[in-house]
Structure formats: C-alpha cells, structure tokens
Image (tube, grey):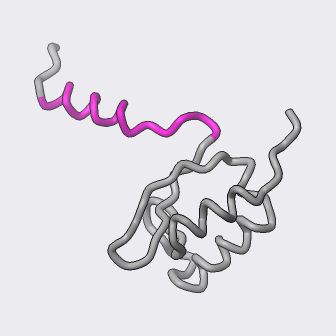
Amino acid sequence: MPQGRSQKRKEGMARKDRVPRGYVPILIGKGEEREKILVHMEHLKQPYFLELLDLAVQEFGYEQQGILHIPCTAQAFRSIIGAIPKSKS
C-alpha cells in the first residue's frame, strides 16, 4: 500500500527531531525564555547535574510529562555543564 503525503511528512519530521544516541533532550529556562539542549548521558550522573535535577523536582515535582524541564537560565546551565570534567575515553 503506497504511503500518503501526510504519512511521509510525519516520518520526515520524526527523523529531523531524533536525538542522537547517547544524548537526552532537556528544556532549560524559566518563564517564556526556554531552550531545548541536548545533554550527553555521561553528564546525568555528575554531582553538578544531580543538583539541577533536584532543582527541577523542587519546581515541578516528580510528575513531569514529556521532555525534562530544568528551571535555570541557559547561560547558567552551560556554565554548570562546562564545569563538569571531561571523561577520559
């Protein structure tokens, strides 16, 4: 059965929105200023990042739906991620 134009369009959008292997999408920001950032999974176990997750729990609880949202500025988030030592691989 041939695919319709709308089916191809949905598949194209899904391909474009795919997250690379080893990364997690996170929504950063407060209020109207929000930005989607891809974070490597290695960062998720770092103490700095765990503090950000605690901040998210305080703000939104454990029941977040969809993409993880962390309530801090993108600039602060990048500074924190930049402070995490690079793994030696």
Q: Residue at x 36, y 30 (%)?
A: 15
Outermost residue toward the bottom in this view = 58
**Quadrant in the rendering for residue 56:** bottom right
Outermost residue toward the top in this view = 1
Residue 21 magenta-highlighted: yes
User: Considering only vertical position in the picture, is 3 above or below 60?
Assistant: above
Q: Which residues are magenta?
A: 6-22
Q: What is the x, y in percent for residue 77? A: 60, 65
Residue 27 magenta-highlighted: no
Q: What is the x, y in percent for residue 58? A: 59, 85
84 or 20: nearer the viewer: 84
Instruction: Say which quadrant the C terminus sits in.
Output: top right
Q: What is the x, y in percent for residue 6? A: 13, 31
Give the left or right position of residue 46, taking residue 20 as reference: right
Q: Residue at x 60, y 43 (%)?
A: 23
Q: Residue at x 49, y 65 (%)?
A: 28
**Quadrant in the rendering for residue 10:** top left
Give the left or right position of residue 57, taking residue 18 as reference: right
Q: Main secondary structure of the magenta part?
A: helix
User: Considering only vertical position in the picture, is 5 above or below 10?
Assistant: above
Instruction: Say which quadrant the N terminus sits in.
Output: top left
Q: Residue at x 28, y 35 (%)?
A: 13
